[in-house]
Amino acid sequence: MLTASLALAALALVLAWPAPILLARAAWPSRAPATALLLWQAIALAGGLSMIGSLLTFGLIPFGGTLISGLGGFARALSHGITTTPLVVVSIASLSLAGVLAAHLLLNLALTLVVTERQRLRHRRLVELLSSPSATQPNTRVLDSAAPLAYCLPGNLGSITVLSRGLVSLLDDAELAAVVEHEKAHLIQRHYVVLLAFDAWRTSLPWFPIATRAQHEVGLLVEMLADDTARRSTDSRTLALAIALVAGGTPGRDGDPSGGTTLPGTPALAPAGVVRSATGIAYPADTRSHDRDRLRLTRLVDPPEPLTLAARAGVIAVAVALVAVPTVLLIAPSLA
Amino acid sequence: MATTLGELERSVMEFLWASDEAMTAYDLRDRLAAAEVDRSPAITTVLTVLSRLENKGFVQRQRTSRPHLYRAQASREDHMAELMHEVLGSATNRSAVLERFVGQVSEREAALLRELLESRSHR
């Protein structure tokens, strides 16, 4: 069990720091966003699994040789009273930490789910009150706002795409279709599920900058995926032009209400990891991730060569292994 | 009857927003009929719409008088500001609540994108 525990601890360390940093710096994800998204999910899942697993297996050492016999031994020890040797005290501390960590992560995920669902419902009600159904597009509503806006709102009652009057008048039909395709891709590919999980991960570990970085990367990959899907039914140039127009026409963006659209009662909040530049435009604190934001734009105009099938298969194999290894280490009979 | 409950809700809110005074369900029914939103909305329909709007937190009901008086919880502008704040503002979990098309494209990056597009069309 000590071997398994140490191996899990080593894996947890690698997945907490060097692995996400390397992935965030790598160039290939823009050539295979779907595969990269899978790898990010594997890293997050395996990271949590190995961190908790390491503490669990370490704590069970005095109680049995494997996870199952250790848990059984621990239960027997609890019911028969525990002799408090220093080793047992350390074990109990390790087990408690594993329990607290697991509960913290799961409860935070549940809480994020509930809060997000409530906000979506409120938002949906506001949209339904302030918009009218699109005459041409199904499940699309047009908001009575001059600012060019387009976004999608997932929901249990059926998801909707929201466009603004400003957007509809700014874009021509082809550009508008490109925007709608992009939004639909987000909804159909359920990007909001991944984003929600990474959001929960970030809020669970506020002291852990990698989680913020991971969320940013995942957000970017999801945009690239939606861009790629939209490009299947429209040409790159139209989509790129639509994005340029929409972004250019929204002077106050990302929490900067001082631009063209002045919003009463909007507090100027900046999320963690975002610094406010002198121009009032919020940039990620890390300039490298700012470069990656540019990457999304350059790849819109110059779509990169997709990653080879072999390379993608390799990455998928790594992702599967990342989740499989800690699982096997946990349940394998006595590795010690 | 082509008028849906959603459309009626919006029409009722428009009347409440436009009015400085609190209104009764009967006032609202008359306005709806006059505006020909619905030929002859039943008072029960109007009451249903009002209670739905109350549950959603858009309408305030004054129970002290008979019949009950209704007024808008906040102005249309306030509601629009709330919605815009969620869309444009940096609410920390915005990305999970909704996904914006522009994603992380800033004004400066939009300029870069336009440059890229220009340079390609001149080639």
Image (cartoon, coloured by chain):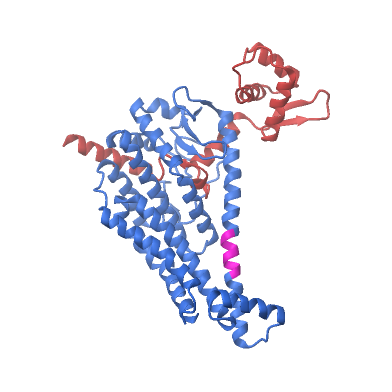
Count all numbered tags in the image, as a single digit. 0
Q: Nearer the viewer, residue B66 or A27?
A: A27
Instruction: Say which residue appears at 45% left-offset and 64% top-offset.
Output: A46
In the rendered view, would you say B91 is above or below A288? above
Which chain can be seen in red?
Answer: B
Q: Nearer the viewer, residue A318 or B81?
A: A318
Residue A258 is situated, as x and y percent measured from the top left of the image, at 47, 40
Instruction: Say which residue appears at 47% left-offset and 30% top-offset.
Output: A164
Residue A94 seen in this snapshot: no
Residue B101 is situated, as x and y percent measured from the top left of the image, at 42, 39
Q: Nearer the viewer, residue A154 or A207?
A: A154
Instruction: Say which residue appears at 59% left-offset and 29% top-offset.
Output: A129
In the rendered view, would you say A229 is above or below A329? above
Magenta region, main secondary structure: helix
Where residue A289 sits, quadrant-wise, is bottom left
Which chain can be seen in blue?
Answer: A
Give yes or no for residue B104 being in the magenta stretch.
no
Residue B117 lies left or right of residue A195; in this view the side is left
Residue A165 is situated, as x and y percent measured from the top left of the image, at 46, 27
In the rendered view, would you say A292 is above or below A258? below
Give the magenta part as a residue range.
A99-106
